[in-house]
Image (cartoon, rainbow, N blue to C red):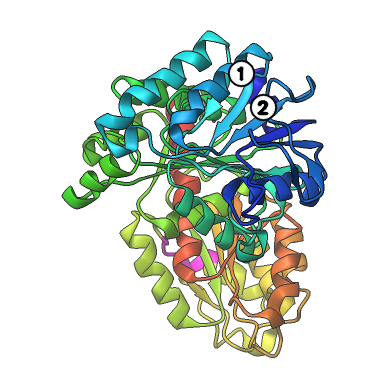
Amino acid sequence: MSALKTMLNPKVTAVVGVSTSNPFSPGNVIFRKLAFEHGLPTYPINPKGGKVEGVDVYKSIAEAPNDIELVVISVPAKYVPSVLEQCGEKGIKSVIVVSGGFSEVGSSGVSLQAEIVEIANKHNISMVGPNCIGVYVPDVLDTFFLPSERVARSTKGHAAIISQSGGWLIERLEEFADRRVGIAAAISIGNAAQTKVTDFIEHFGNDKNVNVIVCYLEGFSEGEGREFVEACKNIAQKKPVVVLKGGKSEAGHRATQSHTSSLAGIQAVASAAFKQYGVIHAVDEDEVMAYAKVFSFAPKYMMSDRIGTLSVSGGHGVIASDEASSYGLEFPLFSEEEQSMMREVMTPAYRSIASFRNPCDLTGSASDIDYEKVLDIMLSFDNIDAGLLLLLPYAPGISLQIGARVANVSKQHPKTVVAYVPDLNKYEVITRGFELNGIPVADTIEEAVQMLNGIRARTRYLQKIGVC
């Protein structure tokens, strides 16, 4: 929809529901963000008129100027239909309804929600919500009614997030900011009364700035589940779609119905459908983070389950092996000939104490050069299709430049590589060296394996449909 493109990059906005007496009302918070933090021309609307933050307040959308491209509605539910009607009559095509009190509250709000959908459809309006916190696009706009100083904001990047839960979305933005994962946009769809998650899947699927689409879903209205997976089937050929689905337990199922009035559906059925249509199903928030991060880098394919691993700690290799086994990933034993090839390029003084069985333990005496040379040999072997680097910078021979140096070796091979580096500020230079050169870095060994699992799942689907 062109209206969604406008919604995510409006030139002029309006907020209906500002207060002339309460500067902390949701409408006022949204107005300040749009007008002052993002510098968007924004018209405040309140039937009483007056001034807000020194800006003249219009008494209605009808009285406001005609250049509005996006309206954010934050008024009691009973007033939303009339405001939406005014938007339609004015020719405005993009609207976000943050107001609650619709189908999520039960039968009393169902008819009201149906009414605003009818109005939006009649006027060809793309409406997000109701019962949502809206849209955030770095450096462009923020309609969340939460004060900026209380919420972290991710930098601009390549992950798009769509969520039926505003709270879950806020937490992901905090985590993404902390983990240096940039986002292209974050969408809270709430009840998804008219504009659905599928609409945004299709929109971001065609956005060249988006490398991965992440969704938190609690369920679908009747018939929408098939529309969703069909849309994902088309998009999955171009970029990964990662889904975390709530409502696994009986209690969770009930909670989804009271939260957004969604039908949670049977988790096993959903999981099978996701796999069939190329959706990457995250089982928890840790996997969401791992998949979002690794696919932000548009990694190379992983043609099999076989991984070659380098470390300077035997214990870390054991942990990685156990984690990989739980995902059905393999660390194949290297042959005597292959082990000899790697041993030959090691620093002579440490050759006899290093192990090259897989995982390879280069020992705490290893240096940057050892990592570079052994990785170069290992990635040439036909019996592995990915590299896992378990990097412990405590070793005296490891420098802060190892990330960039090893990444340059990886670039010479068609196989994907991920790294684990302890999440400590003093190693930020190492992490940046990896990531600026296209190698994603995990904060834990488990996350590094999860990254590889996501790459393998996506590659397996693309193999099935003949793309790779």
Query: 331 or 162: nearer the eye?
Result: 162
Classify 18 as above or below 171: above
Q: Find residue 278 and report its horizontal and vertical position in percent.
A: 43, 32
Kindly check if marks 1 and 2 are in contact, taking CB atoms under 8 A apart as contact.
Answer: yes
Query: 444 or 464: nearer the eye?
Result: 444
Classify 338 as above or below 217: below
Residue 86, which numbered label? 1
Residue 60, which numbered label? 2
Residue 358 visible? The answer is no
Q: Dot 1: within a 10 Å radius of its alpha carbon, few (fewer than 14), some, or many (20 or more) residues?
A: some
In the figure, is residue 308 to the left or right of 36?
left
User: Is residue 332 rendered magenta in the image?
Assistant: yes
If the image is split into quadrants, where does the C terminus sit? top right
Secondary structure mostly seen in the magenta stretch: loop
In the figure, is residue 261 to the left or right of 242?
left
Q: Find residue 115 and report its horizontal and vertical position in percent.
A: 41, 18
Q: Which residues are magenta?
A: 331-338
Q: Give the residue drawn at x 57%, y 61%.
A: 174
- Marks 1 and 2, how far apart in space? 8 Å
The three-letter amino acid code for the residue at tag 2 is Ser
If the image is split into quadrants, where does the N terminus sit? top right
